[in-house]
Amino acid sequence: MQRRHLHLLAALIVAVIFSFTTAWEFVLEDWLIHGFVTHGEVSQAHKWEFIGAATIGAIIAAGIFNLIGLRIFADRDNADERYHRVVDLCPEAMWVNVDQKLVFANAAYIRQMRANSLDDLIGKSALEFIHPDSRDRYNTLREAFLTGQGQIQSEEVKRRRLDGTEYIGEYSVGHTIWNGKPAVQVVCRDITERKQSTEALLQSEMRFRGLIDIATDAVISIDLQGNIQLFNQGAEKIFGHNTEDILGKPLDLLLPERFRSGHGHHLKQFVQSPETSRLMNGRDGIYGMRKDGSEFPAEASISKLALPTGIVLTVMLRDITERHLAEEKLQESEARYRRG
């Protein structure tokens, strides 16, 4: 009896192991039945007991594997759900394309495209939302990315929304898998306002530069270390230096040697004072020094402006050589007149 139970247990175990293989019938028929029966391990009467045990084992195995399969699918579904939930919370617009067709997008992208729902975007061609002005650039970037010859990181592309409005998108693209297929995941930031602000700033700087360059006076900006950051055309004419050569150099190069030692102290005092501007003067007047070493009398004022990048000091200087000469001539004339 004990030996018979062992045979039944063996049949059950083998059935569980081989229940999902194509060799199931062969193993059951040739090994369990013919093998045991032919060699006299069990009697013909117990043949059906072995078959029953093996069948029960197969049913148990099928149930186990079905449960495992359901758990795998459930875990995968849960993982997809968690992924969608996390991506939906991302403030940056994200979407996935398969074969150039949109298959998934997060809430930020739906808002960015001014769509009512994801259904408005699913299946749409990626090229459909690229502005005609940027399609050649987009195709070049895409080809380089797909062939592994380049990456798409923070690339700017002009795009169109569903309502036809335009915006500038900053792209970053990576490879991914979607439902077992190769896919492309895109992160896109709307930088339209940033670009507009930058353009407005450039326009403002150009206007400012235009006004500065038509000024006949020297306009020179320096940082807190006294290094020249701006040198207009008026300064070029007065001092004889080219802008390219003088930028980054110390302001002391434009001063006669006798004024250099106290110049830094005066700048420091002005920076620490509550004043935003003041006239520059001295007991012996103000003098500048040209590139050729010659000196000239000047009148100047200095102002300071606090910017996010730091304090900028700006000097406005005028060459008053002609005024001095005229004053000297007037004094000589008056002296001759008094002498009679």
Image: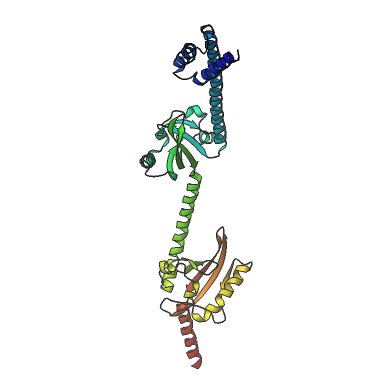
Residue 35 appears left or right of 277: left
78 shown above or below 186: above
The N terminus is located in which quarter? Answer: top right
Residue located 41% across and 71% down the image: 241
Where does residue 17 sit, x and y in percent of width and height?
51, 21
Rendered image quadrant of residue 123: top left
What percent of the width, then of the height, locates residue 108? Answer: 53, 36
When asked about the image quadrant of residue 215, the answer is bottom left
Which residue is at a point 60% across and 68% down the rendered structure image?
A: 271
| Residue 319 seen in the current view | no
Q: Is 66 in front, or is 131?
A: 66
| Residue at left offset 53%, top offset 30% | 80
Instruction: Determine if residue 83 is in view.
Output: yes
- For the image shown, how many numbered marks are present on the structure? 0
Q: Position of residue 69 (x, y in %)?
A: 53, 23
Front one among 188 and 148: 148
Q: Is residue 5 left or right of residue 158?
A: right
Q: In this picture, is 71 found above or below 254? A: above
Q: Vertically, is 175 above or below 331?
A: above
> What residue do we see at 52% from left, 72% from top?
300
Residue 310: x and y in percent read 56, 61
Q: Residue furthest front?
A: 40
